């Protein structure tokens, strides 16, 4: 029972961060499960099963607060679903240390770009961002393989191209619902889903936090969100580099 409440707290904290800045639910939750000795594929499957509910609640909250760019969602979701399917299949059958390490280095650079933009005067881009389907595909691929990463890759690129922060965050969260649903179905058909007490705890905590996080995304100043996003991306990515590097060495 104490562990059940622990995972409610983990789900709440992870969704609070994810819904407010558009990333980190999967990374926070998966890191916690791995620390309990749960295998990577099982951890990713469990987190994505929970994310079907938390991203649904988050997407609904952002929609109610008008944080959604529907054109952006339509360009992101299908490509992300395809990438998520392939990534889940790869994780269920193969190791992916080199891929995670390469993308982590890329994210450190992108985090620095976003941080720099946040520290300077923010200028939103009135035009639709470029290469959105490509970004969505690789975001879904990374998310499934690493147990998280949709937000850092997709939100980072959208913000880096000048998309208004609350629209980038809200649209990314809504599109993620379709991506996580696809990933969960793929894991269900390949390795199955276990650890339902943990999944349930993550769901409860995440659903409670979703409307609070959406409110924060709407009203927290853009520069604060940009700086927070940049710092979190760099920190999480550097941690991934260290862990992946140790895995390759040992």
Image (spheres, grey):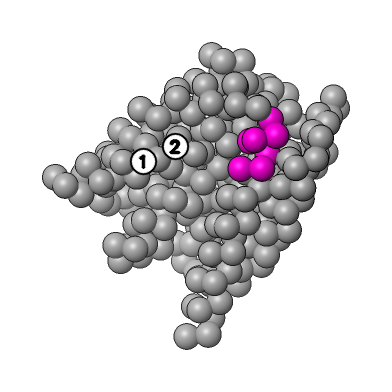
The quarter in which the N terminus is drawn is top left
Position of residue 117 relative to residue 28, above or below, is above
User: Is residue 81 highlighted in magenta?
Assistant: no
Which residue is at a point 55% across and 57% down the rendered structure image?
A: 236
Identify the secondary structure beneath mark 2. helix
Q: Are marks 2 and 1 in contact (CB under 8 Å)?
A: yes
User: Is residue 223 highlighted in magenta?
Assistant: yes
Query: Cα distance, mark 2 to mark 1?
Result: 6 Å
In terms of depth relative to the viewer, which is nearer, 6 or 204?
Answer: 6
Residue 21 located left or right of residue 109: left
Say which residue label 2 marks.
Answer: 15
Which region is colored magenta? Answer: 222-228
**Badge 2: residue crowd in 10 Å (few <14, some 14–19, many ≥20):** many
In terms of depth relative to the viewer, which is nearer, 139 or 10?
Answer: 10
Q: Is residue 172 visible?
A: no
Q: Is residue 180 visible?
A: yes
Quadrant for residue 15, please give it. top left
Residue 161 location (% of width, % of height): 80, 39
Residue at the bottom extreme, as displayed? 250
Residue at the left extreme, as displayed? 1
Say which residue label 1 marks.
Answer: 11
Residue 241 located left or right of residue 25: right
Residue 14 location (% of width, % of height): 43, 42
Checking the image for residue 191, the label placed there is none
């Amino acid at each position: 029972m104490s562990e059940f409440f622990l995972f409610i707290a983990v789900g709440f904290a992870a969704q609070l961060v994810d819904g407010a800045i558009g990333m980190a639910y999967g990374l926070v939750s998966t890191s916690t499960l791995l620390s309990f000795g749960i295998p990577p594929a099982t951890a990713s499957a469990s987190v994505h099963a929970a994310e079907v509910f938390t991203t649904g609640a988050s997407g609904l909250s952002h929609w109610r607060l008008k944080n959604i760019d529907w054109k952006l969602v339509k360009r992101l979701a299908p490509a992300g679903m395809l990438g998520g399917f392939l990534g889940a299949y790869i994780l269920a059958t193969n190791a992916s240390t080199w891929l995670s390490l390469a993308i982590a280095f890329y994210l450190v650079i992108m985090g620095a770009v976003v941080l720099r933009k946040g520290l300077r005067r923010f200028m939103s881009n009135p035009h639709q961002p470029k290469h959105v389907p490509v970004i969505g595909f690789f975001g879904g691929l990374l998310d499934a393989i690493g147990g998280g990463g949709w937000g850092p890759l997709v939100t980072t690129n959208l913000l880096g191209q000048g998309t208004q922060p609350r629209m980038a965050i809200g649209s990314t969260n809504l599109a993620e619902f379709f991506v996580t649903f696809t990933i969960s179905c793929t894991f269900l058909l390949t390795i199955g889903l276990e650890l339902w007490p943990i999944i349930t705890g993550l769901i409860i905590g995440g659903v409670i936090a979703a409307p609070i996080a959406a409110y924060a995304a709407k009203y927290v100043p853009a520069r604060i969100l940009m700086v927070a996003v940049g710092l979190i991306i760099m920190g999480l990515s550097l941690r991934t580099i260290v862990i992946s590097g140790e895995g390759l060495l040992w």
